[in-house]
Amino acid sequence: MSVDENIAGISNVLLYAAMAAYLFAMTAYAADLAESGKVVKARRGEPAAQRAAGRAGATAGGRVAAPPAPPAPARRRRRAAAVGTSLFVLATLFHLGSVVTRGLSVHRVPWGNMFEFALTGTLVVSLAYLVVVLRAHLGAPGAGRDARYLGVFVAGPVLATLGIALRTFYVEAAQLVPALDSYWLVIHVFVAILASALSTVGFSATVLQLVQEKRERSRAAGRTPGGAFMDALPSSVELERTAFRLYAVGFVMWTFTLIAGAVWAQVAWNRYWGWDSKEVWTFVIWVVYAAYLHARATRGWDGRRAAWLACVAFACILFNYLVVNIFFPGLHSYAGV
């Protein structure tokens, strides 16, 4: 089938609109974090002031007076977070439109090369974040606290990935190479996109966990840690649990990706495994995440040790995507860059 250049052009326009909206959303989320950090810091200073007032009341007139009861903290309206979420939803809608029109322009699923993989993968990351925010807003069981604190740490990587994809991996809309013209493209690659997206969100939570844990150690040692905006985020333990859940679901999808890839290889090349560079590194990713889950679940690893192992696993994903796809020759060298 021929390529519809007009629809492909619309896809590019929608992508630029999405990137602009992501940028404004990230700015609003950053403003919300900064304001939240100030509020948390001010509340931490309240007990000391109340104790001082209590001591003053106890000595006034030579008699003991009960210190005034601290007022219940009012629920703060996070206007910047609300604006950021609205802009993030708008950006995701533009992003979804870009992915759909890219597929319509070539009459196939839009993940046939590295640019389209990045385009669809970042959309899944955005949708996953919005689902987490919606679950927390509706008070779903196990949803946890308000997840909008992750907004800047999701919008930033999504925006950066789209920028790199446009600058480095962009190719004109075109038909698939024969090796990819199969229904297995829909199954195998889409599940790989889901696994990568969950791993990306989990990695963001892991980085925040490491930073938060360092700040908690500084505070326990009597020092005042920097980065007041981090006070608005959950504790390192809660962040670690969030990342673990994401990695656990992502690992199931990595397992399916590995199995489906082997079946597709049998259909396309008459063998399940051929030690192709892409196959090897997909297996390496699976092994490292399996080691992380094993260490976390059965060896009692938590905190920094498990977090650094998760970072190694995500580094393998980046290496597979940014290095293996481009510089390692093999049967999977069809990125078009």
Image: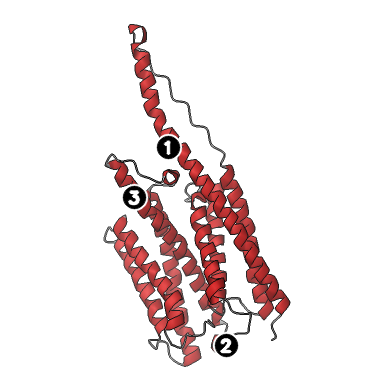
Q: Amino acid at mark 2?
A: Val
Local packing at callout 3 (Cα closer than 10 Å; few below 14, some 14-19, many 20+) is some
Q: Where is mark 2, residue-wise?
A: 177
> Residue at point 39% right, 47% down?
235
Local packing at callout 1 (Cα closer than 10 Å; few below 14, some 14-19, many 20+) is some
Q: Amino acid at mark 3?
A: Glu
- Mark seen at residue 41: 1
Considering depth in this image, is 335 or 72 the residue closer to the camera?
335
Q: Where is mark 3, residue-wise?
A: 213
Tell me where residue 22 appears, x and y as whole percent: 58, 58
**Label 1 vs label 3: CA separation?**
18 Å
**Label 3 vs label 2: CA separation?**
48 Å
Q: Residue furthest right?
A: 6
Q: Secondary structure at mark 3?
A: helix
Q: Secondary structure at mark 1?
A: helix
Tell me where residue 311 appears, x and y as whole percent: 36, 64
The image quadrant where one finds the N terminus is bottom right
Considering depth in this image, is 211 or 238 the residue closer to the camera?
211
